[in-house]
Amino acid sequence: MRNIKVFFLTTIVSISFYTSSFELNENIEIQADKVELSKDENKIYFKNNVQILSNNIEISADSASYDNEKNILTLLGAPSHIKSIKEELFFRGQAEKILFFNNEEVHLIKNANMKYDKISVSSNMIIFNPITGKISSE
């Protein structure tokens, strides 16, 4: 099984699509067994054993797609998992779908649950900012 690493997603997206770039506050690393670029859809697809790592969080999923127009990384899994890599703001959660925005706000959607500090939240949708620690559910 081949493991592909994509470093500095900003550069890859800019070169591949010649449109607006994906700008994160921090660098992000994406690993997957397979990567596909679709110029028609303006998306990048990551398939099988997807791992996302930023300076604040780690996410694992079955697949992911980056929408260059909306600047959103969508992760799908049964379930997908997210956890903090910072001891001072520890959390972990899971959901069938995770949306990761360029400001690192995270939406956990469908069968979502999260443990943060001494709080456990289960909902159809949990919105969380791993930088500020703000959490809400719908």
Image (spheres, grey):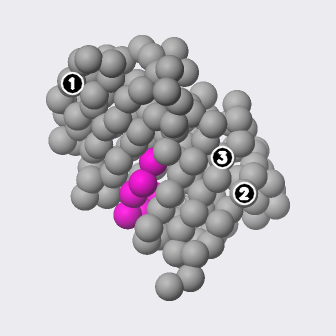
Determine which residue is flagged by label 3: 28
Determine which residue is flagged by label 1: 121
Q: Secondary structure at mark 2?
A: strand
- Residue in the picture at 18% in, 41% down: 111
Q: Is residue 130 visible?
A: no
Q: Tell me if residue 96 comes above or below residue 127 in the rendering.
A: below
Determine which residue is flagged by label 2: 7
- Residue in the picture at 75% in, 44% down: 20
The numbered mark, 2 or 1, whose residue comes first in the sequence reads: 2
Magenta-colored span: 59-64
Q: Quadrant of the C terminus?
A: top left
Q: Is residue 5 visible?
A: yes
Residue 42 position, x and y percent, is: 63, 58
Tell me the quarter of the picture where residue 26 sits: top right
Residue 65 position, x and y percent, is: 50, 57
Main SS, magenta residues:
strand
The amino acid type, in three-letter code, at marker 3 is: Ile
- Residue in the picture at 43% in, 71% down: 48
Q: Tell me if residue 87 comes above or below residue 82 in the rendering.
A: above
Outermost residue to the bottom: 1
